[in-house]
Image (spheres, rainbow, N blue to C red):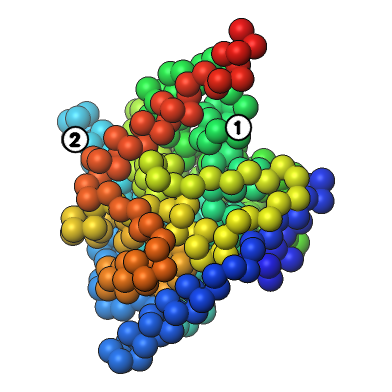
Amino acid sequence: MVYLCAQIEIDHMSKVTFRKNNTQFYSTLKSRVDAYFKNNNLDKTGNWSLYIKSLILIPLAFGLFFSVLYFHETLPVYASLTMCGILGLVFASIGFNVMHDACHGSYSKKQWLNDLMGYSLNIMGGNAFIWKQKHNIIHHTYTNVDGIDDDIAKSPVIRQCHTQTWAPAHRWQHIYVFVVYAISSIAWVFVMDFQKYLSRHIYRTKMGDVDKKEQVIFWTSKLYYLLVFILLPIWVVGFKAWIIGFAVMHVTMGLSLALTFQLAHVVEGAHFEEAYDDKNIENDWAIHQVMTTANFAPKNLLVRWYVGGLNYQIEHHLFPKISHVHYPALSEIVKEVCKEYGIVYNEFQTTRSAIVSHLKMMKEFGNTPPQVQTAA
Ligand SMILES: [Zn+2]
């Protein structure tokens, strides 16, 4: 949306705007969604099911972490490593369910509670302030726009759309991509946050002002992570046991986080744009969101519970300020309006089919581009 463009400044002064054609789609959709909440007398924020989930996941994470440390001498190695792996999965689930809603301001009607729960990201090694800029503003506005969207900016390691530079190694990216995802959360905590903070840029977009309070929060939470997740465990269990457990935790966390977000945008049927110069994106913002996003496993209650409704990413991208607990109901309305306006609603019935589709796309983007074949 044009008003969102004003909030960010892209290097080289390129300007990206959405054409204001067919805005009727979003206004129809919005009025039907508003009517749903009004008729059912519901708040758009989280409800008891989200709060119960928080009360399960957060104590579970603390319990696993301190149990591994406290019982390290009595637990068999496989049990300790399993607990570390589960801890990584629980952290990712706190990210999907609690942090993500809180950082979008949809966890609760109380802003202080959203702020507080958003800091769960800092507890897990990230930074809520940077995330809000990277995710809420850049990713949610310029979804799959190469040159702006940081989520598809992993080149030259992996090539996630046709407009990115190709390298011969990309031919095998559909195989080694799992290694990239496995180290993604560790890279996030120790490399990418620092890159963004020190350069004051998120990919090619200038970050908003990082005031004194945010600077203190950044360094304090990184120091806390060093003390609690590195120095304390090394002191209790020794360096060798810590590094193995820490790596296992990050592998499960990284795989789970990366795959969930990739299945939403880098699959067959998802649309890509590029913006290295001034760009008018063909469609209205809302239509662009539907065209660049996909849902998966809509009937799988376990997947839905674990990924915090992020298997309903179409609804999330259209209504990021509505809590994920409402997405299954909203999906019926979105599907109906998409049908009326002739917009394709991209959905994979199972997680497995979405993963297969993602790998097919990674293989396609890894193939030697025709211009390189011709030059050779
Ligand atoms: Zn989001």
Q: Nearer the viewer, residue 178 or 273?
A: 273
**Quadrant of the rendering where the N terminus is positioned:** bottom right
Disc 2 residue type (three-letter) = Ala
Label 2: few (<14), some (14–19) or many (≥20) C-alpha neighbours in 10 Å: few
Q: Nearer the viewer, residue 194 or 46?
A: 46
Q: Is residue 95 above or below residue 173?
A: below
Q: Nearer the viewer, residue 41 or 50?
A: 41
Q: Is residue 343 left or right of residue 68?
A: right
Identity of the residue furthest to the right in this view = 12
Frontmost of labels 2 and 1 is 1
Label 1: few (<14), some (14–19) or many (≥20) C-alpha neighbours in 10 Å: some
Residue at image position (57%, 60%) is: 283
Q: Nearer the viewer, residue 221 or 7?
A: 7
User: Where does label 2 land, which residue?
Assistant: 79
Residue at image position (38%, 82%) is: 32
Residue 164's label in the rendered image is: 1
Identity of the residue furthest to the top in this view = 376
Position in image of residue 4 (x %, y %): 66, 67
Kind of element beneath mark 1: loop
Kind of element beneath mark 2: helix
Position in image of residue 296 (x %, y %): 29, 51
Disc 1 residue type (three-letter) = Gln
Q: Is residue 196 left or right of residue 174?
A: right
Q: Earlier in the sequence, mark 2 or mark 1?
A: 2
Identify the image quadrant of residue 2.
Answer: bottom right
Measure the C-alpha gap from mark 2 to mark 1.
Answer: 43 Å
Position in image of residue 120 (x %, y %): 45, 60
Q: Is residue 157 visible?
A: yes
Position in image of residue 35 (x %, y %): 37, 88
Q: Is residue 376 above or below residue 37?
A: above
Q: Is residue 193 above or below residue 39?
A: above
Q: Is residue 365 above or below residue 57?
A: above
